[in-house]
Image: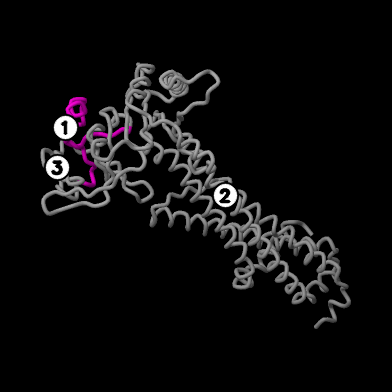
């Protein structure tokens, strides 16, 4: 029997029983859709962290000199205890790094964890849960912040311990409606009065979380109210990504000299860039990549068993048809080919429907939730391959059983 004839017969049989064919493939459709959708969300999250979140937290073309590394979640309790013995990064450390990097676009010192949260009060209005950061003037450059109205924090604000603040877009929008209306107004933070001198332009939301709900205070004023943070950080912004490796090496050397570390002593600080945050996130999603294939394989196996059982039932129902075909000259290989092609086409259709369903689910997730989703070509390819493989594996036995039927017995079946 030519392959085209087997294909025609298989398609005709499948479409003659559409509802049964659909329920036969339901297990494969669900498994493949799950694979495509989950991988799309994971890939979208990875890309989002790489392209947006790292820039929002660290800044583009930037790295940080930190007391505690970004990948804290990957450390053991013993390592965390050792890290807690490190000295807090100081203004002198920031100055040492700045001297070592005269080509840097900006070098800033900022308060770190634990970040205080306070209400910002204006008249009879207030905004709660606002993050308060103590910073030096270059911080806005490092974070790629643009001033929508007013002016940024200056060195004069730092040296004079002036009670001036720059507020995020969300604060200005909720309290003053427009950024321009906020300039020069007095707000109360932690029972102290501050003057709003600038408003940072909106950066939008990241995973549904706004990064515009903050207040920037000159670092000396901040430390006078909330004290020095345990993770004060030096942030350095270079002009191009290619400058980062050399700049990080020079910053490390400057920090070792500033901390008077000997050649054989380990660093009592960490130099991190956005890659560390990406690696930290990737390590978290790696667990999902180990669980998802197992769940999908279970679904594919269950779907394949269903296909095999339905095909065995089909063989029983079509016993007379098989007998007639053998009586007029069909060989075992022809019968085997017919049923195997039918099973493979069924599983391919299930794979295609699963891919479409998974694609639609991924688009729905990206449209109606804060989670990003990106359908990757390799996940679609693997999904279709699994569909074909399940048809081949689970279709062999029904096809072989059909081919072994005795034509006389088959003709007498009805």
- Where residue 304 sits: x, y (%)? 69, 63
- Where residue 202 sits: x, y (%)? 26, 42
Above or below for 339 versus 156: below
Label 2 sits on a secondary structure element that is helix
Disc 2 marks which residue?
A: 287
Residue drawn at x 21%, y 28% as measured from the top left: 158
Residue drawn at x 54%, y 42% as measured from the top left: 76
* Residue 160: quadrant of the picture: top left
Residue drawn at x 18%, y 29% as measured from the top left: 157
Q: Quadrant of the C terminus?
A: bottom right
User: In terms of sequence position, does the residue under pointer 3 or pointer 2 come before the other?
Assistant: 3
Residue nearest the observer in this picture, 302 or 68: 68
Q: Which mark is residue 162?
A: 1
User: In terms of sequence position, does the residue under pointer 1 or pointer 2 come before the other?
Assistant: 1
Mark 3 crowdedness (10 Å alpha carbons): few <14, some 14-19, many ≥20: some
Magenta stretch holds residue 242: no
Q: Which residues are magenta?
A: 143-171
């Amino acid at each position: 029997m030519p392959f085209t004839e087997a294909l025609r017969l298989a398609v005709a049989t499948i479409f003659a029983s559409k509802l049964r064919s659909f329920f036969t493939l339901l297990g494969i459709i669900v498994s493949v859709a799950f694979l495509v959708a989950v991988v799309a969300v994971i890939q979208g999250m990875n890309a989002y962290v790489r392209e947006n979140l790292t820039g929002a937290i660290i800044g583009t073309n930037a790295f940080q000199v930190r007391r505690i590394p970004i990948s804290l979640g990957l450390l053991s309790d013993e390592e965390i205890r050792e890290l807690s013995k490190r000295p807090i990064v100081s203004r002198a450390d920031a100055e040492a790094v700045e001297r070592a990097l005269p080509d840097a676009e900006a070098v800033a010192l900022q308060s770190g964890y634990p970040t205080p949260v306070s209400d910002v009060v204006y008249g009879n209005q207030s905004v709660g849960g606002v993050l308060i950061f103590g910073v030096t003037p270059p911080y806005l450059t490092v974070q790629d912040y643009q001033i929508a109205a007013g002016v940024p924090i200056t060195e004069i604000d730092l040296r004079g311990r002036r009670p001036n603040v720059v507020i995020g877009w969300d604060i200005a929008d909720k309290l003053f409606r427009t950024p321009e209306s906020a300039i020069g107004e007095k707000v109360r933070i932690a029972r102290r009065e501050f003057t709003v001198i600038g408003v940072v332009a909106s950066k939008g939301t990241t995973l549904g979380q706004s990064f515009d709900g903050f207040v920037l205070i000159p670092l000396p004023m901040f430390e006078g109210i909330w004290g020095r943070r345990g993770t004060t950080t030096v942030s350095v912004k270079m002009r191009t990504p290619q400058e980062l490796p050399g700049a990080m090496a020079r910053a490390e050397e400057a920090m070792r000299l500033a901390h008077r570390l000997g050649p054989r002593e380990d660093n009592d600080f960490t130099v991190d860039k956005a890659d560390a945050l990406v690696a930290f996130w990737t390590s978290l999603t790696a667990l999902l990549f180990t669980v998802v294939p197992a769940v999908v394989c279970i679904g594919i196996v269950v779907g394949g068993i269903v296909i095999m059982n339905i095909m065995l039932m089909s063989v029983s129902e079509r016993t007379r048809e098989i007998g007639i075909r053998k009586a007029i000259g069909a060989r075992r290989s022809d019968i085997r080919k017919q049923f195997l092609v039918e099973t493979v086409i069924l599983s391919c259709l299930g794979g295609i429907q699963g891919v479409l369903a998974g694609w639609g689910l991924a688009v729905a997730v990206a449209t109606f939730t804060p989670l990003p989703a990106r359908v990757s070509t390799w996940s679609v390819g693997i999904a279709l391959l699994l569909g074909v493989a399940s048809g081949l594996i689970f279709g062999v036995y029904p096809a072989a059983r059909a081919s072994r039927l005795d034509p006389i017995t088959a003709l007498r079946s009805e």
